Amino acid sequence: IVKLEQSGGGSVQAGGSLLLSCTVSGYNPTKQCIGWWRQAPGKEREGLGGIYRGDGDTYYHDTVKGRATVTQDNAKNTVYLQLNRLSPEDTGIYYCAAAGGKCLYSDYEAFFPYWGQGTQVTVSS
């Protein structure tokens, strides 16, 4: 059974940073695409960025480019999202998602068959 366990999040002051983690288990092969997504209140879920675990290649969407860093710790089967210079617009539920292979279609939710439980991030001004 594939499982993505998320941790991190909570309440953060504007200007601060967050670090979210996503631990993947039960997924073989290990060459996965892990994407990070966010759903803001009243909005559709949007992709933020992600990583292809096979070679560590990362991608970022414009909304977070320059503020986000996705990293991985293969020994822990964990992928991280760090997001800096937070604003209230970053408030939402953050999800990690997994798909086999390279991140070719990472713009599409349907590309990711496996999702974490989501974690709430609230940024106050």
Image (cartoon, grey):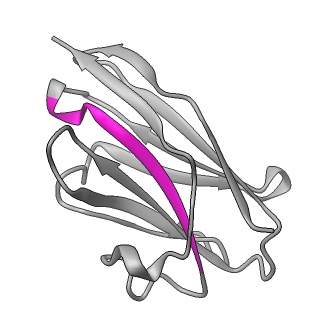
- Vertical placement of residue 69 versus 125, above or below: below
Residue 22 within the segment the image draws in magenta: no
The percent coordinates of residue 110 (x first, y second) are: 40, 80
Task: In the rendered view, tell whether residue 69 sits above or below residue 114.
Answer: above
The one of 48 and 59 positioned closer to us in this rendering: 48
In the rendered view, does 58 fall on the left or right side of 125? right
| Residue 33 percent across, percent down from the top left | 56, 74
Q: Is residue 95 magenta-colored?
A: yes
- The one of 90 and 52 positioned closer to us in this rendering: 90
Please give the name of the residue rendered at 83% of the width and 67% of the height, measured from the top-left corner: 26
Whole-percent x and y of residue 91?
25, 31
Residue drawn at the location 42% of the way across and 88% of the way down: 104
Give residue 42's quadrant in the image: top left
Identify the image quadrant of the N terminus.
bottom right
Task: Kindly identify the residue that appears in the image at 26 percent across and 49 percent down.
Answer: 66
Q: Quadrant of the C terminus?
A: top left
Left or right? Give the position of 44 relative to 23: left
Q: Give the range drawn in magenta.
A: 89-99
The prevailing secondary structure element of the residues shown in magenta is: strand
Up the image or down, 59 lies above or below 102; here it is above
- When asked about the image quadrant of residue 6, the answer is top right
Residue 74 is drawn in which quadrant? bottom right
Q: Where is residue 108 in the image (x, y as percent from the top left)?
A: 32, 78
Q: How many marks?
A: 0
Q: Which residue is drawn at 37% across and 55% down?
A: 37
* Left or right: 26 as drawn, with respect to 119: right
